[in-house]
Every structure is written in C-alpha cells, then in structure tokens.
C-alpha cells in the first residue's frame, strides 16, 4: 500500500470523556477513493471517531493525518472535507438554494462558479424544482438530498457521513443506498460512513471497520468480515441471524477452550452428527429458520423452505470449510484452524460431521 | 356537544376576562370619553369640548417637551438594552466554570424593585461623594450632578432603565439561543464559516421572533416604566426628564386636570398600539417562524 493511497490515517487515537473512554488507542488507515463504513453497535465510538476526523472534537491522545498532514489544531473548515449529519443540519430559514450554496458563499466563491456548480449538483440530485423551497416544505428524503448536495457541491475529496439514512423509511433507504454509492463512485469521493446497520455496511462498503467498545474489532472487505470474522464479537454482530457460537465440547470432543462458529446457512439436517432439540421454527418465505439447542447452547439453522421441517430431536451437520474457530477466552480467531490455511494442526480432533 | 365545549371554554376565560375588562378595557374607553369633556371644577360642571383637549396639547410646551423626551428615551433605551441583553446572553449561553454566578449577576438588576434601583443610582450620580463623581475627580475632572443637570438628566434616567432591563431581556435571548441546534453550528464550521458570519447569517435570523418579542416589550416599557423618574428627577430639572406617562401623572393627580390627563392617556395608548402593530407588521417579512 503506498502512502498516497491513504486519505486518512488514524494513529493510536484515544478520546476519553469524564467517565469513560469513547475511543481507546484506535489505529486504522482509510484509503483514498474508497467507501469505508464504520460499523458497530450504538455507543461504540463511531460518531466520536468521525467527529475527531472532522475536527469537531479533539482527541485526548494520538494523531490523525489527512493527506499526510497532522490535523491537530486544524479547524474543521480547513481539513478539506464535507459532512452529512443524521439530522441533516439544514438551515431552517434559508431556501434549498441558499442551503446548498452556504459553504461557497461563506468562502466567497464567485457567483459564476456558484451558479455553475449549483446547476450541476441540483441536476445530479434531482433538486432543480425544489431550489426555492424552505427545508420545512420538503419530505425527509428531499431534505436528505439537500444535505448531500451541500456536501457534494464543496468539491472536497473527503465526505463524512453519520448515519445519514437512519431517519428515512425502509424503501427510501434502499434507494438512497444505491444512489449514495453511485455518487461516491462517480465523483471518486473518499467516504467515511457511520452506521449501526449491517445491511448498509454490507451493501455499500468497499471496506468495513467493525468497532466495539471504543476499539476496532476488524477491518476488511464485506466478504471477509462475513466469512472470516476475526473475533467472536464480529461473528455474533454480523449476519441476521448472526453466526452460531458453540463451545467445542458441545459439538465434539475437541480441544478445550475453543469456540466454534458456524453460520446458520452452513448448518444442515443429517442422520448422524450432534443431536439437537427443536426450540422453534420461523418461516421467512424463501427460507425457514430453525431454532434449536445442543447441550444447552442455543443455535439457529437456516434451511430452504421446501425442505422438511425437523422433528423434536434432530441431528445437525456442517461442512469443514464453513467452520470458524475462536479462542474461548480472548474471543480471537484461531487461524490455525482455518480450512484454507491448511495448517498441520487443522485436523487434530475427530469430528462427527457427515 | 360543540355548544357545551364553547360554554366550557368561555367559563374558563371568564375570570381573566372580567379582570381584563374591568381594569384595562373599561378604563381605556372611559379615558376616551373623558378626554372630550372638560374637568369639572367647583361650580363649573363638566362641558363637552370635542377635540378641545387635543388642540390644547399642540400649544402645550410641556407636552411637546415630554413627547420629544419620550421619543429620545425610547430611541436610547430600546436598542441599547436589546443589544446589551443579546451580548450578555451570548457570553453566558454556553456552560463554563461559574456560568451560573455570571447569569445570576446579569439577572440581579431585574429582581430588584425599580424604586430601590433608582435610589442606588442616585448615590452613584450624587455630586461630590457619588461613585461616578469620585471617579471623575480622581481623573481631575470637575464635579458633575448628572441627575440634577438639565442636559444630562434624561440620559441618567435612561441608563438606569437600560441597566435594569438588559438582564431581563437576556433571559429571553438565553432561551432562544438554546434552541439553535448545535449541529447547525457544526455544519457551518465544516464549511469554514466564522463565528461572526454564523451569528449574522444563522443565529440572528433564527432568534428573530424573540428579538421582535423583546423589542415590542422594550418599546412598551420605555413608555410605561417611570418609577425611577419619581425617585430621581421628578421630571426635572425644568422638564428635562419629563416623560409622557410622568406628565400624565402630574396633570391628573397633582393638578387634578383629569380631562386633559385622559386626553394625554389616549395619546399614550395610541402610540403604544401603533408601536406594537408597526413592529409586528414590519418584522413579519424578515421573521422566520418555524
Ligand atoms: N460529549 C460526550 N460526553 C461524554 N460522553 C460521551 C460524549 N459523546 C459521546 N460519549 C460517550 O462515548 C461513547 C461513544 O459515543 P458515540 O461515538 O456517540 O457512539 P456511536 O456513534 O457509536 O453510537 C458513548 O459511551 C457515549 O456515551
Ligand atoms: Mg452515533
């Protein structure tokens, strides 16, 4: 990775508040031109990190570099970035036009440039007919577009977004996901996007940064985050329903202190294998979710709706490649057990899969 | 159903209504009626004079002086106290160490009775040993009697008004400033907007309804609050600090020319109504209501 590829470098950044640490020595590079999603449960420090990048807040410790420059002491307006807020943060007394042009006007950009950019952006966002309205005369989706237009018109290379779609209804959110992504690609923007919604992360991200409790759990492309979670936290956070986590002893006589993770869709019914008790069945149309229990450990199995529903007692099986192994104490992935790494230790226990 | 709700509603407003009519509307109408008659004196009964009392005003030098003074007084106290109130509110609307004490300090003049305040200020103004005179003399200036000189009496009264009202108006601005969302400030900061530009382009328009409310009240108070004139100058010297309301009091209750006082009162009511209406009308276009 070359230095020039990195738009933002977060280096051992800590943000401590009076009572708690919102961020604890976080380090991560954010690549230029990529759509990076900060994903994690509420309160894990995503917004805090975004606000530190924006300069709206100051870290207690550590450095933030943007385009290789240390940003300590640089005001938000001089960091070369734009931001879209969850609440849109539109100026209620200004028209859509004035809202979009606010930044350019404040920076005393020439009228001609303003008009030219406004035309281009309004067209791109489909805001042309709404330019003379006040924000209160717009729907939530339209307000969202204005907020986006205000960020885009600045022509700044980095755009920060804090849960920008969370106030929209489901249908609109799905449309906006596609649109946001296409705008980002079209303009080559470096987007840092905060969300707690894994669907947004999975569908839009080039790269996902999974956060928990003020720390980074994993950084990777969506496929890697899903298929190879680095920690039990990521495993149990990603996926609906998330990955099943079993103590190894519940499945086979494997090494102690091992947690085995298997995605619901990677489990299937067999004649042999560990025996499970049926807890409940949820019909989802194409699929069916079967909730069961093995030696007191609850799990979920996903099967096509056409398959027969299991009886009260059933056996489960899974493919070797679908198995994830974690250290039960630290919750960290044990790469020795990864199928593709083909390590010699890989099969040092006998399993009872079909 | 509808009828019952209406009766209920009227019963609820009835007590307030009774007091409002008895003590506000009826006296106003009565003043209007009285103002077109003469004052009854000894054996001379009250006579209908039509606009006679109003014509008399035009030739009354004290009335003209009082009008000019009141106008000047309003022009001085209204903008100054509003600007001061806003400045103070901006200083204390964000939390910092000791902010509560500072807000309290700004608000204190408001909770003191105006008559007491006037007495305190009389000491400040007192020639020779007063606070201001002591400072003057320290810097080698001659002694001055601010409240007692014709050329400064009105201003010294106006200063007391400003001092007393700014703290009160600050409370309204304080409340208004809290309603300006923090994210707007942040969105503007991202755009590189300076604090002053943000204040001018966002804060000021957003608190415009409050500014309007406060300024209507300030104008009304400029004509209504004369307690300190009683204590400090009694309208003098030589009518230098004579305000319309104080003149009404003098005419009505010192010289007992109640009919003329009624006519003066009608003028006062007219001025206040116009000021209120005018401000609402003028500001309507510039005000942003959510
Ligand atoms: N201004 C603040 N003062 C004190 N604690 C804060 C403040 N802002 C955030 N926090 C705390 O920091 C943690 C992370 O918050 P935040 O970054 O907003 O989480 P997220 O955006 O991931 O939901 C939370 O525990 C929150 O309570
Ligand atoms: Mg947040």
Image: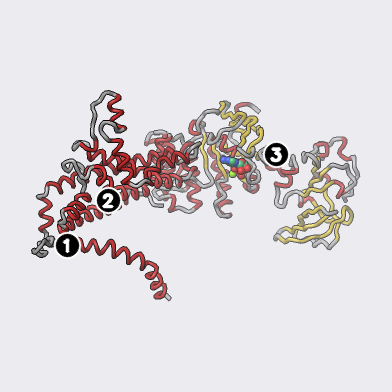
* Residue A244, horizontal then vertical, whole percent: 77, 49
* Residue B268, horizontal then vertical, whole percent: 21, 53
Q: In this view, does A20 lie to the left or right of A76?
A: right
Q: Are marks 3 and 2 in contact (CB under 8 Å)?
A: no
* Residue A279, horizontal then vertical, whole percent: 79, 60
Is residue B269 shown above or below A55?
below
What residue did someone put label 1 on?
A: B34
Q: Which of marks 1 and 3 is in front?
A: 1
Q: Which of A178 and B222 is in front in this view?
A: B222
Q: Nearer the viewer, residue A36 or A1?
A: A36
Mark linked to residue B224: 2
Dot 1: element? helix
Q: Are marks 1 and 3 in contact (CB under 8 Å)?
A: no
Q: Which chain is home to disc 3?
A: A
**Res. B269 image quadrant:** bottom left
Question: Which color scheme is applied?
Answer: secondary structure
The Cα atoms of the two marked residues, 2 and 1, are separated by 21 Å
């Amino acid at each position: 990775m070359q230095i020039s590829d990195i738009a933002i470098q977060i280096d051992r950044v800590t943000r401590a508040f009076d009572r708690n640490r919102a961020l604890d020595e976080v380090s991560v590079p954010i690549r230029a031109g990529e759509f990076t999603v900060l994903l994690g449960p509420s309160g894990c420090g995503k917004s805090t990190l975004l606000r530190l990048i924006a300069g709206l807040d100051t870290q207690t410790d550590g450095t933030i570099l943007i385009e290789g420059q240390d940003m300590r002491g640089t005001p938000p307006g001089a960091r070369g970035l734009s931001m879209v807020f969850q609440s849109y943060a539109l100026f209620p007394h200004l028209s859509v036009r004035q809202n979009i042009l606010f930044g350019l006007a404040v920076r005393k950009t020439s009228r001609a440039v303003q008009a030219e950019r406004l035309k281009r952006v309004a067209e791109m966002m489909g805001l042309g007919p709404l330019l003379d309205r006040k924000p209160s005369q717009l729907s939530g989706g339209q307000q969202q577009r204005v907020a986006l237009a205000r960020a885009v018109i600045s022509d700044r290379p980095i755009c920060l977004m804090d849960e920008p779609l969370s106030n929209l209804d489901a249908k609109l959110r799905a449309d906006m996901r596609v649109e946001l992504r296409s705008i980002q690609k079209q303009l080559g923007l470096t987007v840092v996007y905060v969300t707690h919604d894994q669907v947004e992360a999975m569908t839009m991200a080039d790269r996902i940064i999974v956060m928990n409790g003020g720390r980074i759990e994993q950084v990777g492309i969506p496929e890697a985050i899903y298929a190879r979670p680095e920690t039990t936290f990521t495993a149990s956070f990603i996926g609906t329903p998330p990955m099943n986590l079993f103590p190894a002893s519940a499945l086979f006589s494997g090494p102690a202190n091992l947690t085995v993770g298997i995605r619901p869709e990677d489990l299937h019914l067999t004649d042999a294998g560990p025996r499970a008790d049926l807890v409940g069945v949820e019909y989802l149309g194409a699929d069916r979710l079967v909730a069961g229990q093995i030696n007191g450990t609850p799990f979920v199995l996903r099967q096509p709706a056409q398959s027969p529903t299991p009886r009260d007692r059933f056996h489960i099986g899974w493919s070797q490649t679908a198995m994830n192994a974690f250290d039960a104490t630290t919750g960290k992935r044990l790469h020795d057990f990864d199928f593709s790494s083909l390590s010699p230790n890989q099969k040092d226990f006998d399993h009872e899969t079909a | 159903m509808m009828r019952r709700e209406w009766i209920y509603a009227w019963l609820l407003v009835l007590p307030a209504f009774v007091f409002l009519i008895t003590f506000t509307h009826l006296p106003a109408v009565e003043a209007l009626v009285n103002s077109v008659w003469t004052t009854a004196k000894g054996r001379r009964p009250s006579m209908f004079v039509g606009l006679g009392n109003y014509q008399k005003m035009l030739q009354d030098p004290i009335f003209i002086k009082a009008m000019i003074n009141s106008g000047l007084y309003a022009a001085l106290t209204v903008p100054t106290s509003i600007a001061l109130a806003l400045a103070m509110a901006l200083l204390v609307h964000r939390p910092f160490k000791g902010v509560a004490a500072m807000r309290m300090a700004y608000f204190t003049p408001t909770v003191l009775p105006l008559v007491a305040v006037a007495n305190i200020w009389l000491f400040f103004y007192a020639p020779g040993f007063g606070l201001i005179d002591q400072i003057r003399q320290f810097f080698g200036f001659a002694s001055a009697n601010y409240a007692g000189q014709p050329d400064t009496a009105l201003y010294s009264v106006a200063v007391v008004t400003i001092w007393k009202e700014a703290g009160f108006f600050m409370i309204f601005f304080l409340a208004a400033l809290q309603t300006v969302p923090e994210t707007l400030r942040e969105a503007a900061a991202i755009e590189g907007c300076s604090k002053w530009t943000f204040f001018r382009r966002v804060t000021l328009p957003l608190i415009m309804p409050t500014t309007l409310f406060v300024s209507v009240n300030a104008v009304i108070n400029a004509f209504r609050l004369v307690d300190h004139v009683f204590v400090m100058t009694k309208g003098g010297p030589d009518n230098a600090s004579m305000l319309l309301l104080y003149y009404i009091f003098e005419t009505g209750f010192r010289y007992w020319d109640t009919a003329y006082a009624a006519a003066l009162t009608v003028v006062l009511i007219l001025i206040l109504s116009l000021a209120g209406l005018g401000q609402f009308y003028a500001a309507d276009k510039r005000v942003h209501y959510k």
